[in-house]
Amino acid sequence: MLYPVILSGGSGSRLWPMSRTALPKQFLPLVSEHTMFQETLLRLQGLPGIAAPLVICNDEHRFLAAEQLRAIGSTPLSLILEPFGRNTAPAVAVAAFAAQAEDDQAILLVLPADHLIQDIPGFHNAIQSALELAQQDKLVTFGITPDRPATGFGYIERGAALETGEHTFAVARFVEKPDTDTARKFLDNGRFFWNSGMFVFKASAYLSELQHYHPDIHAAAQRAWQHGVRDMDFHRLDENAFAACPADSIDYAVMEHTRAAAMVTVDIGWNDIGSWSSLSDVSLKDEQGNVLRGDVFSAETADTYVRAEGRMVAAIGVRDLVIVETSDAVLVMHKDFAQDVKQAVEYLKQAERTEHLVHRRVYRPWGYYEGIDIGERFQAKRIMVNPGSKLSLQMHHHRAEHWVVVSGNAKVTRGDKILMLHEDQSTYIPIGMKHRLENVGEEPLYLIEVQSGSYLGEDDIVRFDDDYKRG
């Protein structure tokens, strides 16, 4: 059986200010109404003999992944939580152990969660070709037919043609991201293909090659899986074992060394959406070559990507720009510098700011909150609680809170009392008092929270009981 492995642990910093540590690009709806993560799962529909997916994600994104799976009706075989990133070789090793626990003949289809594929039938056909090779114990990757001298991708040089089909080849070598002149030579040569980072192989074949070339990764990943624990709908890897695991990619750890590497070449409308310019390339444009999203006015503007998330944006007399507006940051950049967004992210890190970490709207398993205003000793938030959900029973050492219900029905635990609050009603939570908020209605609960005190950080929370088992 074919087991999809969805790798969703990336950070996507080149798509800042939309993509941030707490909400990276794979969990954003950048191309359609579905997120990139959801699109990756949905494009598997119709494949024969396919199992439920194995999803690998960072621990802090577990509720995002679970909710987005639920929203498209997908139940994973396992949702595996990495305590921290260790690149793709360990992540896929863990997935291989998980698949083997179900089926010792398992074949893995390894897919990053942040890619765009426009030709779904072509993609399915390529998977079938890769399956034939995988049955022969080949480690198969997909080489994308290049249409330009791109310098943002690694390349694969094709070797001898294989008997399984006209688009199947041995791999001659992997090549690092080239400079522009080398990329032009690769394009003219016709033997070089973009490295997609997608793979098909038997779980056993991958683990065998990994054990041969990197026994330390194999052993650490095996311990992390075997000593992991079930936590609600998640499988938590053993933190100590995973911490001891070297960080390495599949390419470096295995594919560049193995003699079993094979490639299926494809032209399927693939893009890794690695930058704002690449997102612009695959988006529907107007007659002037512009991509306009949200409340945007443009005049005498051409070949420009404008995305307005909250406020009106006007672009007048500009060309070849990327303009992205969010509630707390605005990016204005020439398309030629799309790979340099990380400079802004690095500046925010060095300045110990938060705009690279979270949006003003911060998602939680029970709903979300978003900042409205903050000042000396006070902070105001808008809170939404999903129907039937509740926050943890908690208290704060340094802040008091005042809650005003805007709409919905709230059940409030306040010390040893239970209150029912409705629209326009409010309550006050003093410093040090245990409290809890629950939506007992059938519609979302909205309220305004005003915090006051000497310290207003999110780490001033002492939890006594929590449905989501957070510390």
Image (cartoon, helix red, strand yellow):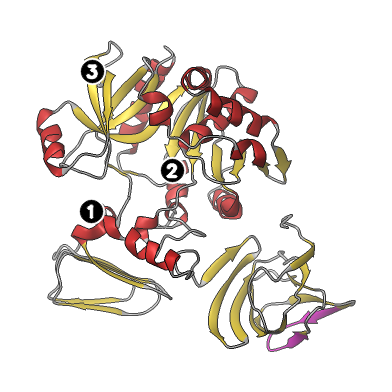
| Magenta-tinted stretch | 418-428
Disc marking residue 159 = 3
Q: Nearer the viewer, residue 417 or 185?
A: 185
Name which residue lies at 76% across and 76% down: 397
Give the image location of residue 455, x and y in percent. 66, 79
Name which residue lies at 71% across and 64% down: 389
Q: Which residue bears the numbered disc 2?
A: 40
Name which residue lies at 42% across and 60% down: 19
When the figure is inspected, residue 337 is found, relative to residue 296, above or below; the finding is above
Q: Amino acid at mark 2?
A: Thr
Name which residue lies at 64% across and 34% down: 224
Q: Mark 3 falls on what kind of element?
A: strand
Q: Residues within 10 Å of mark 2 (few under 14, many from 20)?
A: many
- Relative horizontal placement of residue 387, taking residue 210 as reference (left or right): right
Q: Mark 2 falls on what kind of element?
A: helix
When the figure is inspected, residue 8 is found, relative to residue 405, above or below; the finding is above
Q: Which residue bears the numbered disc 1?
A: 281
Q: Is residue 46 visible?
A: no
Q: Main secondary structure of the magenta part?
A: strand
Q: Quadrant of residue 130?
A: top left
Q: Nearer the viewer, residue 271 or 400?
A: 400
Residue sitting at the far right: 416
- Mark 3 vs 1, N-terminal side: 3
- Relative horizontal placement of residue 455, taking residue 245 as reference (left or right): right
